[in-house]
Image: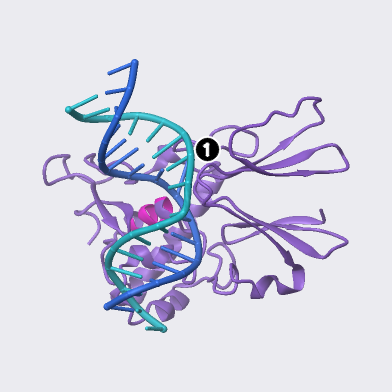
Chain colours: A purple, B cyan, C blue
Amino acid sequence: VRAVRRRAKYIIIDLSPSEDCLVLHLGMSGSIRISGKSAQPEKRPHDHMEIDFRSGKRLIFNDPRRFGAVYLIPAPALDRHKAFVHLGPEPLEDGFSAAGLHARLKGRTMPIKQAIMDQSIVVGVGNIYACEALFRAGIRPTLAAGRVSLKRLEALAGHICAVLAEAIAAGGSSLRDHRRVDGDMGYFQHSFGVYDRAGEACPGCDCKPSRTGGIKRIVQGGRSTFYCPRKQS
DNA sequence: CACGCCACCTGTGAGC
DNA sequence: TGCTCACAGGTGGCGT
């Protein structure tokens, strides 16, 4: 193993001397763990791949729902691989901008929420962080992507970066299974403004939870969307 | 090409 | 207790 890095939601492990990349995607339910040299390495349900290292350690890829993926790709072909060829910019690196977003979204009728979850437009934004970024930006998730002004996209781009950075610093969002590398839970779920809070009052808003007020849940593209109708227009 | 819908899987919790 | 149903962090393929 020469390096471990990431592109979008793919973990990339650079190998030598083969010059191959071992690429892992955890899907919705995947995890990897390292088991030590213990005489009796534990087996768990849904362990799908094990790699033994000379050190005696073992890398185990576990994925109950099997939405994850494993590829072995020659390094020079990585960018041309089907999983990588269409990927958009990284929100936390140079190359991500509201102007770029504006250009990609021009004329698109797809809802803005689905657009920012589209990995060809911007990578790394999943269902939770799409909801949270739109909430912070005050943008209604159902708006046609092509009709969101550059000014509002500037706010949105900033909030996408901020939400992701905060979530990473918090160790992610442990809704149920997600764990940090050290096994501890992430705690960004405690900072959700709207996600999984249907019926509640949103923070910083005087919307009262009631029949008509409070955070709403709708379905877009088969995924739950949470938003505050008062704050997001 | 854009878009809406559905498939891929298993586990869990709510409701009856 | 046990059944059925809805839903879950993501992605890709199909038909229109």
Magenta segment: does it hold A223? no
Which residue corresponds to the image point at 46% horizontal and 35% vertical from the top-left? A176
Q: Quick check: A232 left or right of A156?
A: left
Which residue corresponds to the image point at 69% horizontal and 70% vertical from the top-left? A78
Q: Which residue is mark 1?
A: A186
Q: Looking at the magenta stretch, what is its main secondary structure?
A: helix
Q: A45 or A28: nearer the eye?
A: A45
Which residue corresponds to the image point at 76% horizontal and 68% vertical from the top-left? A74
Where does the magenta region start and end?
A: A128-134
Which quadrant would residue A30 be assigned to in this image?
top right
Q: Is residue A21 above or below residue A94?
A: above
Q: Is residue A98 above or below residue A177?
A: below
The percent position of residue A119, horizontal first and vertical second, equals 49, 66
The mark total stands at 1
> How crowded is the residue under tag 1: few (<14 C-alpha within 10 Å), some, or many (20+)?
many
Q: Amino acid at mark 1?
A: Gly
Which quadrant would residue A72 be assigned to in this image?
bottom right
The percent position of residue A138, horizontal first and vertical second, equals 29, 59
Residue A122 in view of the camera: no
Q: Is residue A182 above or below residue A91?
A: above
Residue A5 in view of the camera: yes
Q: What kind of element bears circle 1?
A: loop
Q: Quick check: A136 left or right of A86?
A: left
The percent position of residue A76, horizontal first and vertical second, equals 75, 73
Q: C10 or A130: nearer the eye?
A: C10
Q: Quick check: A37 left or right of A167?
A: right
Q: Quick check: A125 left or right of A31?
A: left
Assign the C terminus of chain A to one quadrant of the image.
bottom left
Which residue corresponds to the image point at 24% horizontal and 39% vertical from the top-left? A200
Q: Label 1 marks which chain's residue?
A: A
Q: Is residue A219 above or below residue A119?
A: above
